[in-house]
């Protein structure tokens, strides 16, 4: 699969894909006549990178995870710890975000009540 197709599939730029390759997060990508040819393994790695990126994992952390992954089964416990730590951080962020969303919903509800209820402000002081 060509880089343009991969970029369209994941809704990212080709330069982002090249950056991930330069950082050692994917690849080396096979080339046919100088053109990158992504295989299933490359796409699985892209899935992983974009997933953990969405969860807030840094490039440095991704590199650490991939380095331990490439060392084989002896690093399974370390990889598990890395992912569990990221999951905990992501769950904390989700909790904070959920609280903020609920707060915004309440504010929006208050504003709607104010606009459509002429006694809204009077009832607040009671």
Image (cartoon, rainbow, N blue to C red):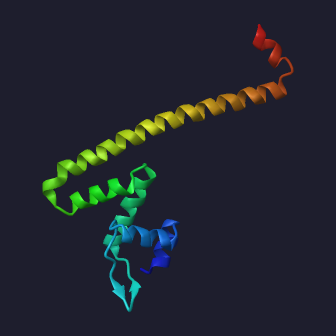
Q: Going 54% across and 31% down the picture, which residue do you hit?
A: 99
The N terminus, quarter of image: bottom left
Which picture quadrant has residue 20? Answer: bottom left
Q: Going 18% across and 48% down the picture, which residue do you hit?
A: 77
Q: Going 27% across and 60% down the picture, which residue do you hit?
A: 66
Q: Going 17% across and 61% down the picture, which residue do you hit?
A: 71
Q: Choose between 9 and 74: the one closer to the eye.
A: 74
Q: Position of residue 114 (x, y in %)?
A: 80, 25
Seen as rendered, the residue at the extreme left is 74
Seen as rendered, the residue at the extreme right is 118
Establish if 51 lies above or below 11. above
Q: Position of residue 102 (x, y in %)?
A: 59, 31
Q: Is residue 126 left or right of residue 86?
A: right
Q: Choose between 38 and 22: the one closer to the eye.
A: 22
Q: Position of residue 97 (x, y in %)?
A: 52, 37
Q: Is residue 42 left or right of residue 79?
A: right
Which picture quadrant has residue 53? Answer: bottom left
The C terminus, quarter of image: top right
Establish if 73 lies above or below 26. above
Q: Is residue 35 left or right of residue 110?
A: left
The total of numbered circles placed on residues is 0
């Amino acid at each position: 699969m060509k880089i343009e197709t991969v970029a369209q599939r994941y809704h990212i730029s080709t330069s982002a894909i090249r950056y991930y390759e330069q950082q050692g997060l994917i690849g080396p990508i096979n080339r046919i006549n100088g053109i990158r040819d992504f295989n299933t393994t490359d796409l699985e790695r892209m899935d992983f990178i974009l997933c953990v990126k969405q969860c807030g994992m840094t490039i440095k952390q991704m590199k650490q995870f991939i380095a331990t992954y490439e060392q084989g089964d002896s690093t399974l416990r370390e990889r598990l710890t890395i992912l569990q730590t990221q999951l905990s951080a992501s769950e904390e962020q989700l909790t904070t975000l959920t609280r903020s969303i609920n707060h915004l919903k309440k504010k929006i509800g208050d504003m709607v009540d104010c606009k459509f209820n002429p006694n809204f402000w009077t009832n607040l002081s009671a």
